[in-house]
């Protein structure tokens, strides 16, 4: 669950969905299936983690292609929704990395207990740094979204 913190945008991204462009009915059904798959009662474990990561990567590839080759199909409203969504994505990613760093430090992952202490410390240090950099990135996305909102309002 995402914890509210300084780098998280104050806009409810999901509240902007009613006005967002819509996919076809068939594609919307897939979104519902994904919500069922990853919803509150979803099983926790490696298979779900791998599947969720795969879906996220496919979606990010699509967004990357669109921002590379079709940015002009979006207006400032959609740019705002994108920036707010990227902030939310980055906030989630940052907190996942921070949780992972704590679990690495505590050797919660199977197999870490057998790793040399210096390796676990190096892993934890790099994850902790990535979490800090992630906070800064999310903060910059929040600021960019604020600039867009206050300029186009």
Image (cartoon, rainbow, N blue to C red):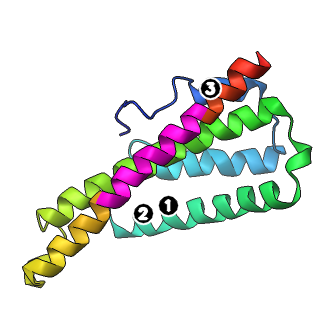
Q: Position of residue 105 (x, y in %)?
A: 14, 64
Answer yes or no: do the residues labelled 1 and 2 have beta carbons within 8 Å? yes
User: Which circle, 3 or 2, is nearer the viewer?
Assistant: 3
How many tags in the picture?
3
Residue at left offset 59%, top offset 65%: 57
Q: Report how far apart the C-alphas of labels 3 and 2 lie in the structure.
A: 34 Å
- Quarter-wise, where is residue 35 in the image? top right
The boundaries of the magenta stretch are 129-143
Q: What residue does disc 1 label?
A: 52
Image-based side of 10 in relation to 83, left or right: left
Q: Which mark is first along the chain, 2 or 3?
A: 2
Label 2 Cα neighbours within 10 Å, binned few <14 / some 14-19 / many ≥20: some
Q: What residue does disc 2 label?
A: 48
Image-based side of 33 in relation to 149, left or right: left
Answer yes or no: do the residues labelled 3 and 2 have beta carbons within 8 Å? no
Is 79 inside the magenta-drawn segment? no
- Quarter-wise, where is residue 80 in the image? top right
Q: Main secondary structure of the magenta part?
A: helix
Residue 146's disc is: 3
Q: Position of residue 148 (x, y in %)?
A: 71, 28
């Amino acid at each position: 669950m995402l914890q509210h913190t300084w780098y998280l945008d104050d806009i409810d991204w999901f509240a902007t969905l009613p006005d967002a462009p819509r996919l076809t009915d068939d594609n919307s059904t897939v979104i519902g299936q994904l919500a069922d798959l990853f919803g509150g009662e979803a099983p926790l474990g490696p298979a779900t983690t791998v599947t969720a990561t795969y879906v996220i990567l496919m979606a990010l590839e699509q967004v990357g292609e669109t921002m590379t080759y079709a940015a002009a199909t979006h207006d400032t409203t959609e740019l705002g929704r994108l920036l707010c969504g990227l902030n939310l994505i980055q906030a989630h990613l940052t907190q996942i990395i921070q949780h992972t760093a704590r679990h690495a430090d505590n050797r919660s992952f199977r197999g870490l207990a057998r790793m040399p202490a210096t390796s676990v410390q190096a892993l934890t240090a790099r994850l902790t740094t990535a979490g800090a950099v992630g906070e800064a990135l999310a903060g910059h996305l929040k600021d960019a979204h604020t600039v867009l909102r206050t300029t186009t309002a």
